[in-house]
Every structure is written in C-alpha cells, then in structure tokens.
Amino acid sequence: MTEDDQKRAAKILRPYRKQINDIDDRILKLLTRRFGVVRKVAGIKTKHGLPSFLHDRVEAVRNRCVAMAEKQGLDPQFVYALYSAIIYRSCALEDEIKSELLKKKKK
C-alpha cells in the first residue's frame, strides 16, 4: 500500500476508528473497574481463607458470558478464550494480593 493509499484509507476510516477508540476506552475503563472489584474480593478471600480459584464460579462466569455471546451473535469460542484470560489474570492478581496481605500479617 502506498503512502497516498494509506492517507486515503485513514481519511475514509477516521470516523470508524474514532468509534472503535471510544469503545476501546470504555472496555478498558470497565476492565479497570472489574479488577478493582477483584482486589476487594482478594481481601475477603484472604480474611476467610478461601482459594483464589473457585472452579464452579469460573465455569459459571464463562458459561454465562458464552451464552450471552451466542445470543448477541458473537463467536462463543472467542468469548470463552477472552473470559478465560480475564479470569486467570483475576486469579493471579488475587494470589498476588493475598500473598502481600499474608506477608503484612506476619510482620
């Protein structure tokens, strides 16, 4: 693609790219909120001696999101993989926070 073609494409796609950027901004803000809740959950799980990974809950979240994806015409395999990544990162974050809290407790 030539530089002129790239400029032409950028001009034609500008309004759509803006929409995509705005949506991405909202997605990232929502992920930030979600991980904020995960941080709170980590404290609760630490206090009550609960594990970070709760298999039944993981399956329930993924299944719910896959079902919603199917209803909305999204690729369920993509949504399954996406939520697997979000969930596993959430569990890792919980483990990190729980470890920090337990270290503080021992001091």
Image (tube, rainbow, N blue to C red):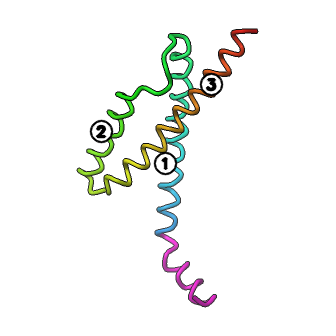
Q: Which mark is residue 80?
A: none
Residue at 34% over, 28% down = 56
Amino acid type at mark 1? Ile
The structure residue drawn at horizontal position 35% and vertical position 35%, both measured from the top left corner, is: 61
In the picture of the structure, the residue carrying the numbered disc 1 is 27
Main SS class of the magenta portion in the image: helix
Mark 2 residue element: helix
> Quadrant of the image for the N terminus?
bottom right
Above or below, 85 against 59 in this view is below
Name the residue beneath numbered marker 2: 64
Q: Given the current orientation, which residue lies at the most extreme right position?
A: 107
Q: Quadrant of residue 55?
A: top left
Q: Magenta segment range?
A: 1-15
Q: State how far apart marks 1 and 2 are (Cα).
A: 18 Å
The count of marks equals 3
User: What x and y, as percent, mark residue 34?
Assistant: 49, 35
Say few, some or many: other residues with alpha carbon within 10 Å of mark 2 (under 14 / 14 to 19 / 20 or more).
few
The residue beneath circle 3 is 97
Looking at the image, is mark 3 or mark 1 nearer the viewer? 3
Q: Label 2 near label 3: C-beta < 8 Å?
A: no
Find numbered disc 1 in the image and state the secondary structure of the residue it sits on.
helix
Quarter occupied by the C terminus:
top right
**Distance between the alpha carbons at the discs numbered 3 and 1:** 24 Å
